[in-house]
Image (spheres, helix red, strand yellow):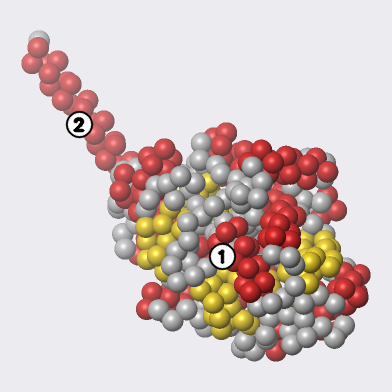
Amino acid sequence: MKRAIGLAAVAIAWMIGGCRQGESHQPIKVGILHSLTGTMALSEKAVCDGTLLAIEEINAEGGVSGREIQPVVVDGKSDWPTFAREAERLITREGVSVVFGCWTSASRKTVKDVFEKHNNLLFYPVQYEGLEQSPNIVYTGAAPNQQIVPGVMWCINKGWKRFFLIGSDYVFPRAANEIMRARITAFRGRIVGEEYILLGSRDVKKAVARIVDAKPDVILNTINGDTNVAFFAELRAAGITPRCIPTMSFSIAEEELASMDTGTMAGDYTVWNYFQSIDSKENLEFVARFKSRHGADRHTSDPIEAGYFGVHLWAEAVKKTGTDDVNAVRKALAGQAMLAPEGIVVVDAATQHTWKTVRIGQIRADGQFEIVWTSHRPIRPVPYPPIKPKQGWDAFLDALFQRWGNRWANPGALP
């Protein structure tokens, strides 16, 4: 009798083990949540392409521990409620292990509660205003001290004193300009104007007229999406060129320039962590692979690259732990490093942001950037600029949220 029970136990154990072995080779479903339509599609479609390239590379090498990555691509439609609904669906109905996505801070903040509620993981690939730290978000784009602050300080060091701030009317530009204002005034600069345009709007004439009247030394631009096309066209029509009043942009990269008149943009500036023009073996190979996959006329950019290496960081964490469990992956990510196309990146264990090198580029007529300044080494991320205590920043964000009717963007920006 004991022998029969023992044999039965062995059989059950074998069957369970066989099932687990079979499950271990099942695909890992991951979500890709970006705007494929609407005003932000100009920027976000390309990040989706970079994310898919990384997935294809990993699958071509046998997947993650023998498991194929199966992407589920969803359109956020440049609409924050849609982002929230689709994030919920990806997690609860599609059963994804992780989501790569979002561009605007309005979309990220809208989905943040969804990821925290379900203890899922979002990899966010875009520079942003900081003022946030979530255990369920890995920030592969720049924190304020890795983009906004160095960009402003470079302008100040150029001797420019009169600044005009212009941005889209949602949480990122409002918070970014608060950070810029503190730095400019601390170094005795002067803000001669500040304007906001509804996200997706092309009504830019009034803002440009005020820039003409203000006669700044430099324009600090946090406009997002295809509004930039209308804005720069109107600047040039008003006689403002890079030679007389340069613009430092924080959300224009190679992909956006491809939709603009680069001949008239040449001479303006932007600050990122990555440019396609970085002359390194890792980057040249990355650019070649991206063009081979998506077309010889395509460009890489900072958000594309951050979306790309985020997938590789996640895959390495899954390999290291042998599971796609969120808690295990999060633990494995802490301190993880990678030689990315931009250089060495490291996941900061304290903040889940990444250490990144800062670069400033001047736009060339061919739509690429001449790198005119670099930090030469990765900079530790500081999500909360020390110009206010965390409670002060929380109050600042709450005031914006309430002003917009419990939204993260001016409601006029919503479809």
Q: Is residue 122 above or below residue 148?
A: above
Of marks 2 and 1, the one in the foreground: 1
**How far across and down, in percent of the image, does residue 25 sit?**
32, 47
Q: Residue drawn 82% across and 83% down?
A: 240
Q: Is residue 365 above or below residue 359?
A: below
Q: Where, quadrant-wise, is the N terminus in this rendering?
A: top left
Tell whether 370 sits left or right of 309. right
Q: Where, quadrant-wise, is the C terminus in this rendering?
A: bottom right
Residue 393: tell me if it is visible: yes
In the rendered image, which quarter is residue 11 located in? top left
Label 2's element?
A: helix
Q: Residue drawn 73% across and 84% down?
A: 242
Determine which of the numbered discs, if any, sits on residue 9 in the image: none
Q: Nearer the viewer, residue 390 or 322?
A: 390
Mark 2 crowdedness (10 Å alpha carbons): few <14, some 14-19, many ≥20: few
Q: Residue drawn 81% across and 75% down?
A: 216
Dot 2 or dot 1, earlier in sequence: 2
Q: Is residue 184 above or below residue 7?
A: below
Label 1's element?
A: helix
- Which residue does the numbered mark 2 point to in the structure image? 14
Q: Nearer the viewer, residue 152 or 36?
A: 152
Separation of marks 2 and 1 at Cα, in angstroms: 47 Å
Contact check, label 2 and label 1, Cβ < 8 Å: no
In the rendered image, which quarter is residue 117 located in? top right
Tell whether 15 sits left or right of 84. left
- Which residue does the numbered mark 1 point to in the structure image? 303
Q: Amino acid at mark 2?
A: Trp
**How far across and down, in percent of the image, does residue 20 sit?**
29, 37
Q: Amino acid at mark 1?
A: Pro
Tell whether 203 sits left or right of 370. right
